[in-house]
Image (cartoon, coloured by chain):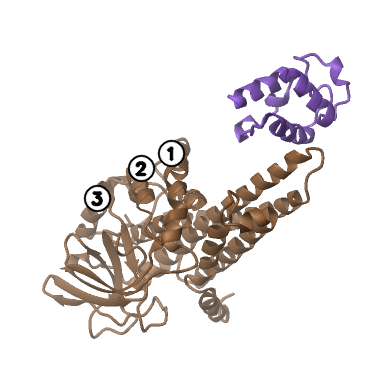
Chain colours: A brown, B purple
Amino acid sequence: MANQKQSVVSAVEFEKLLTRVHEIGRDVIAVNAADVDQKARFPTEGIAALKQLKLLSAYIPTEYDGMGLDLIQIAKLCEVLGHYCGSTAMIFAMHQIVVACVIRHAQGATWFHSYLREVSQQQRLIASATTEIGVGGDLRSSICAVETDGDHFRITKKAPVISYGVAADDIMVTCRRASDSPASDQVQIIVRKDKGPVTLEALSGWDTLGFRGTCSAGFILTAEGATEQIQPAPFADILQQTMHPHAHILWSSLWLGIASDAVNQARAFVRNEARKNPSMPPTSALRLADADAVLQGMRSNIYLAAIDYQKMMADNHPDAFSGFGFAIRINNLKVSSSNIVVDIVNRAMLICGIAGYRNDSKFSLGRHLRDAHGAAIMVNNDRIMNHNANMLLVHR
Amino acid sequence: MSVEKIREILIQHGRLSVPVDQITNDGDLYKAGLTSLATVGLMLALEDNFDIEFPDSLLSRKTFSSIEAILDAVTQLEK
């Protein structure tokens, strides 16, 4: 299962699935979005609806009872969900990123094969605990180490954020391979609350401007389990080849959904205005045309990266990820999408005017704007650009 | 009633090259000079007058091909 092949779901079947997703988007996810945002609570209803459509196993190959969608289709799902609730879309995206790490890097590991089947059959939701207090946000170093005793392991990690850690069934944890390993010699472990014990001791809450429903609080995580739950591949490879590109492509896709919904709202507003004087388009129509052009650029950038990466995965060439070029490109995608989503929501706000600025109007863009600002913050753009600055010294 | 209203809106927003009273209900509006750009204003005026909203699925050339076709669309949306 090393290489993610083309989707086994035809374009026609996928369109049907998208129609269903739009239905639950309208009828379930959007209906609860304001309450999720206001109370900073987990989007229980929306995630339950996604499970009903078996979407938590959308990316899992059919041989493990999943739907067998490809990356481009998963990106499209993130975009569609982003239209209705940024937090629900983010949770969906983060779950798929962990799934990607397992399906692409657990070759030959029997435990992970049956685990994937369980994720499909039980629609298990997986969170991840990658950052750690004391490493300054650097995913590539860990302080905590897995302690093994025979076929049993124990891990304790102080995580400044574990998005939806409380609601998740399982959590993917990064840590050092052993207590005498250097900070960068890391592995990934899937810890399961049902095969525990897994405990989460709260360290901090999650009262933020946006993405409030992701409930990304901080915890001291302690977990035990069987050593076969430790992914055999080094985390360095998983991150470079899978987690990093999947994260930035799928996050960008859901930001695209937020931006696209803001433009849709602006369009509805302009149309209202235009009805008052059908022979003469309002000035805001010009702003809408500009915003739409920027949105198109954002979309093209994301899908081109997704298409190219999809092909790289299918080709499965061992050197495809070795140079800096691909990492730089994915970093550029993240930084540019995260900036553009704010720009587009701002444009929509200007078009809708006071109706967009109000919290109590049907054209309100408050949540869009607050969510959009999270994009540059989560994995801070400055950190990413510093990496690129470094790599570009030698890359050409 | 609706047909009269549609004719009135056509006079105001259709930018046709033929006087509207010379066009029969099943007459081809595109042959009478209706352009796709003019259908935008026409549609917005119809939305405003009949308090309806055209979904994307109805934004086709066929919807605005004749007064009858417009009436069909409006009646369908008013339900």
| Label 1 SS | helix
Q: Secondary structure at mark 3?
A: helix
Above or below, B71 relative to A93: above
Asked whether A176 or B39 is in front, the reply is: B39
The residue identified by callout 1 is: A20
Residues at marks 1 and 2, CA–CA distance in whole angstroms: 8 Å
**Identity of the amino acid at label 3?**
Arg
Q: Are marks 2 and 3 on the same chain?
A: yes
For residue B36, say whether it is visible. Answer: yes
Image height of B14 relative to A391, above or below? above
Residue drawn 44% across the image and 67% down it? A244
Is residue A274 placed above or below B57 in the rendered structure?
Answer: below
Q: What chain does mark 1 sit on?
A: A
Marks 1 and 2 close (CB-CB < 8 Å): yes
The residue lying at 70 percent from left, 23 percent from top is B70
Mark 1 Cα-neighbour bin, 10 Å: few <14, some 14–19, many ≥20: few
Q: Amino acid at mark 1?
A: Arg
- Looking at the image, residue A143 sits to the left or right of residue A264; the answer is left
Res. A171 image quadrant: bottom left
Do discs 1 and 2 belong to a common subunit? yes
Residue A42 rendering spot, x and y as whole percentages:
37, 58
